[in-house]
């Protein structure tokens, strides 16, 4: 069953460009607390849903995301602290469809959260740097200049899932389940602080 699912995922193509030292740009959360407001749409083989939401971000490695279904009938939340993703027990199944795993969720926020590995291969093609992490490849990273643009999770030589950032639009796609989530950022505000109560879930 797993083999047939992987067969549906696109094959990882060889890295393009010239070999380069295995040094990656620093992709970290910018200093200061932020509130990022977005619209979202989830496309799943079983249904489509949309709404709005907000991410409250506390550098260097903490964020809370809240999702509200259009029409106000339901909501969900997720806490991301380091490499740990916490979801409320109520509505957890829906939240897992909405929220990528931690490394890809961090990529959606512009932070590199992929586990490091000694076997890292880097190639540069113009202003684009690509890196394959681990052997066999577990992750492929794409930077344009110093900005993290795309993170791909790889298994068996195939791209299982990925996140791509292009301006105000962030796209997540799980290839084997044919599920995708698109966030369109409508506003980013600097805030002076965050209520400590947001770091707990009911």
Image (cartoon, rainbow, N blue to C red):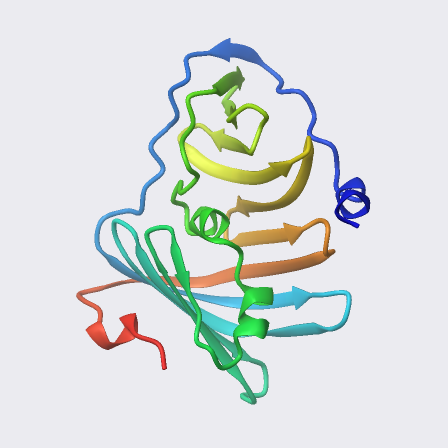
Quadrant in which residue 117 is drawn: top left
**141 left or right of 9?**
left
Whole-percent x, y for residue 76 in the image: 48, 76
Whole-percent x, y for residue 192 in the image: 17, 65
In the rendered view, tell whether residue 183 sits above or below residue 4.
below
Whole-percent x, y for residue 46 in the image: 76, 71
The residue sitting at 31% across, 47% down in the picture is 29
Residue 195 visible, this orientation: no
The residue sitting at 47% across, 51% down in the picture is 108
Quadrant of the image for the C terminus? bottom left
Whole-percent x, y for residue 65 in the image: 41, 67
Towards the viewer: 184 or 137: 137
Quadrant in which residue 12 is drawn: top right
Q: How many marks?
A: 0
Towards the viewer: 52 or 75: 75
**170 left or right of 88?**
right
The residue sitting at 33% across, 32% down in the picture is 26
Residue extending farthest to the left is 192
In the rendered view, tell whether residue 3 sits above or below residue 88.
above
In the rendered view, tell whether residue 46 sits above or below residue 150.
below
**5 left or right of 169?**
right
Residue extending farthest to the front is 1
Residue 12 visible, this orientation: yes
């Amino acid at each position: 069953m797993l083999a047939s699912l992987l067969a549906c995922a696109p094959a990882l193509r060889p890295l393009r460009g010239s070999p380069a030292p295995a040094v990656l740009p620093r992709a970290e959360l910018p200093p200061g607390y932020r509130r990022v407001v977005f619209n979202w749409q989830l496309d799943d083989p079983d249904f489509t849903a949309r709404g709005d939401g907000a991410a409250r971000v506390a550098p260097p490695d903490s964020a809370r995301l809240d999702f509200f279904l259009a029409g106000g009938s339901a909501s969900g939340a997720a806490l991301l602290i380091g490499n740990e993703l916490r979801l409320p027990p109520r509505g957890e199944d829906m939240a897992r469809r909405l929220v990528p795993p931690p490394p890809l969720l961090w990529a959606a926020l512009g932070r590199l959260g992929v586990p490091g590995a000694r076997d890292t291969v880097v190639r540069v093609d113009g202003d684009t740097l690509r890196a394959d992490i681990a052997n066999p490849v577990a992750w492929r990273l794409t930077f344009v200049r110093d900005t993290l643009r795309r993170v791909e999770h790889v298994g068996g030589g195939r791209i299982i899932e990925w996140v791509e950032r292009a301006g105000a639009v962030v796209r997540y796609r799980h290839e084997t389940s044919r599920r995708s989530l698109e966030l369109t950022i409508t506003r980013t505000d600097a805030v002076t602080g965050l209520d400590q109560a947001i770091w707990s879930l009911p």
